[in-house]
């Protein structure tokens, strides 16, 4: 099988394929650190920990961040062609970028902690397989005291991919890096982040204006609901853009629907009050966001 990697050498984000002689020692170091987490590491339950699977090895690679900036959001895509000539793809969001790029309501101490555990620092490396990403920044430096995960603090875990599925023998595989500010942006990751930021600021502005006008909290939330629409039964995990000309609006509507779901869920929580929710949403107008730029 032919295995190709399309990385971003102009931005010093490099992929070391499993066929490279450099792959094995890099993987061994990642595996060693994976098996011996340092003090202050997030307590991830075993069933949610990303795995290095032998069946993924042929299509895996090691990502080296040789840039001077950390990686905060990362999407990778595999393109497969089997011996029968069929083509298909597998896309995986390795780093969502949401906590750091959209820090609405996130305390400064939590941002510092996430800045270590939810990024790829300059000089660090990661294993990228169909099952997910493995590795952390301890190969560059240990976490400082304010970056350590607090004892007793839980961790929100996301969906873990299942790795390569049964399929016909492969003729070729291409692994492509897709990024937030750089890269081919095949999965519209840049647009999704920007749309999410716009949706947050839109409802926050409505809340702030309503509060300044002296409207009651229930009325303010009703005005926000006119923009978000009714809450869906479940949040949208993935949006597949059908028309690039309307991509921004499609993604913004999806982000607004996800906010409607969050608000509806919050209103069912014990001790909830409309006033508390309005103040929470209002505070988003003071959030300092990065300058989202396409590379």
Image (tube, helix red, strand yellow):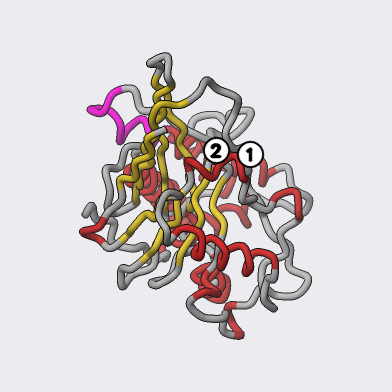
Q: Which residue is mark 2?
A: 260
Q: Nearer the viewer, residue 271 or 51?
A: 51
The percent position of residue 90, horizontal first and vertical second, equals 46, 32
Q: Residue furthest front?
A: 21
Q: Quadrant of residue 91?
A: top left
Q: Which mark is residue 264?
A: 1
**Magenta stretch?**
243-253
The percent position of residue 140, horizontal first and vertical second, equals 48, 77
Q: Which mark is residue 199?
A: none
Q: Quote the CA–CA distance across marks 1 and 2.
A: 6 Å
The rendered magenta stretch, by its main secondary structure, is classed as helix
The percent position of residue 21, horizontal first and vertical second, equals 42, 58
Q: Residue at x 29, y 54 (%)?
A: 181
Q: Residue at x 58, y 78 (%)?
A: 147
Secondary structure under tag 2 reads helix
Q: Residue at x 63, y 39 (%)?
A: 264
Q: Nearer the viewer, residue 246 or 199?
A: 246
Q: Quadrant of residue 285?
A: bottom left
Taking the image as shown, residue 142 lies to the left or right of residue 177, namely: right
In the figure, 271 relative to 80: above or below?
Answer: below
Mark 1 residue crowding within 10 angstroms, few (<14) / some (14–19) / many (20+): some
Secondary structure under tag 1 reads helix
Mark 2 residue crowding within 10 angstroms, few (<14) / some (14–19) / many (20+): many
């Amino acid at each position: 099988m032919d295995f190709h990697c399309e990385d971003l050498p102009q931005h010093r984000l490099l992929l070391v394929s499993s066929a490279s002689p450099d792959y094995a020692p890099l993987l061994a170091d990642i595996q060693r650190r994976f098996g011996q987490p340092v003090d202050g590491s997030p307590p991830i339950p075993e069933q949610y920990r990303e795995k290095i699977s032998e069946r993924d090895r042929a299509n895996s690679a090691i990502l080296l961040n040789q840039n001077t900036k950390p990686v905060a959001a990362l999407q990778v895509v595999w393109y497969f062609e089997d011996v029968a000539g069929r083509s298909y793809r597998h896309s995986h969001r390795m780093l969502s970028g949401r906590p750091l790029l959209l820090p609405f309501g996130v305390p400064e101490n939590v941002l510092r902690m996430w800045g270590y555990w939810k990024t790829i620092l300059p000089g660090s490396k990661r294993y990228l397989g169909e099952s997910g990403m493995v590795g952390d920044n301890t190969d560059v430096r240990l976490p400082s005291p304010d970056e350590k995960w607090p004892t007793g603090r839980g961790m929100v875990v996301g969906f873990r991919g299942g790795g390569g599925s049964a399929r016909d023998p492969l003729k070729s595989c291409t692994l492509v890096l897709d990024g937030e500010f750089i890269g081919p942006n095949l999965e519209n990751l840049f647009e999704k982040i920007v749309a999410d930021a716009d949706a947050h600021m839109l409802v926050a502005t409505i809340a702030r204006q309503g509060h300044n006008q002296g409207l009651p909290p229930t009325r303010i939330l009703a005005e926000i609901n006119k923009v978000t629409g009714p809450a869906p039964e479940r949040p949208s995990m993935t949006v597949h853009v059908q028309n690039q000309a309307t991509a921004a609006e499609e993604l913004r509507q999806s982000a607004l629907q996800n906010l409607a779901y969050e608000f509806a869920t919050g209103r069912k929580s014990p001790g909830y009050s409309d006033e508390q929710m309005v103040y929470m949403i209002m505070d988003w107008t003071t959030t300092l966001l990065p300058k989202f730029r396409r590379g």
